[in-house]
Image (cartoon, helix red, strand yellow):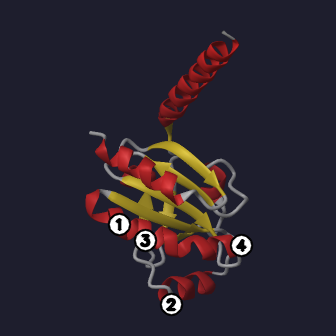
Amino acid sequence: MKKALIGAIAAAVLAVGAAVYLNTGSQAAPASTFVLLDGSKRSTDDLKGRVTLVNFWATSCVTCVGEMPKIIATHDKYKSRGYDTLAVAMSYDPPSYVVNFAQTRKLPFQVAIDNTGAVAKAWGDVQLTPTTYIVNKRGEIVKRYVGEPDFAELHQLIEKLLAEA
């Protein structure tokens, strides 16, 4: 009896947890303007229609540099299916370092420099790097990772979001 009750409680907690997770998609990504390395601009509205990983990072962040090959591999795996990546360099990162990093690593996605810190501020006052957001096709944040994501879990989430209409 006791085991059955504990099992039922655990199942209820998991069901509630899953519902909360699924409902986190209601937070719209903050209105922002991203200045890309080539000088062009993108806005949060430009993210709509694609599943997008927005990664706040810095060239001085060991974890950021370490996870970058996995972010590249994820981008390459899903880009043909409506997935995009936007790497946002923090305001304290010297632009020349960011340009050098993007060029030498041949980053296959867009890189923005948040030279004023306004984008990081708008996205929840990001201060820790890496901080990564997953934005669904409707332009809503569905997940935030502080630190390196669990890439197996991340890929499952991307698959699910890409399958949505």
Vertical arrangement, residue 23 with respect to residue 144, above or below: above
Nearest to the eye among marks 3 and 4: give it: 3
Distance, label 3 to label 4, CA atoms, is 26 Å
First in residue order: circle 2 vs circle 3: 3
> Foreground residue, 159 or 42?
159
Per the image, the residue denoted by label 2 is 104
Q: How crowded is mark 2: few (under 14 residues within 10 Å), some or many (20 or more)?
A: few
- Labels 2, 3: front one: 3
Label 3 vs label 1: CA separation?
6 Å
Residue 36: where, in percent of width, then height?
A: 47, 72
> Marks 2 and 1: CB-CB under 8 Å?
no
Q: Around disc 1, counting alpha carbons within 10 Å, would you say few (fewer than 14), some (14 to 19), or many (20 or more)? A: few
Q: Check disc 2 and report its element: helix, strand or loop.
A: helix
Q: Which mark is residue 77?
A: 1
Crowdedness near tag 4: few (<14), some (14–19) or many (≥20) residues, C-alpha within 10 Å: some
Foreground disc of the pair 4, 2: 2
The residue singled out by tag 4 in the image is: 92
Kindly state the secondary structure of the residue where label 4 is placed: loop
Kind of residue at badge 3: Ala
Q: Which mark is residue 19?
A: none
Q: Are marks 3 and 1 in contact (CB under 8 Å)?
A: yes
Residue visible at 59% across and 16% down in the picture: 8
Query: What separation in Å lies between label 4 and label 2 (alpha carbons)?
Result: 20 Å
Query: Contact (CB < 8 A) between labels 2 and 3?
Result: no
- Check residue 73 in the rendering and tell me which mark sits there, or answer none: 3
Q: Which amino acid does label 1 sit on?
A: Lys
Q: Residue 124 at what x, y percent from top left?
A: 65, 47
Percent x, y for residue 156? Answer: 43, 50
**Label 4 with label 2: CB-CB less than 8 Å:** no
Q: What element carries label 1?
A: helix
Sequence-first disc among 4 and 1? 1
Residue in view at x 50 percent, y 63 percent? 34
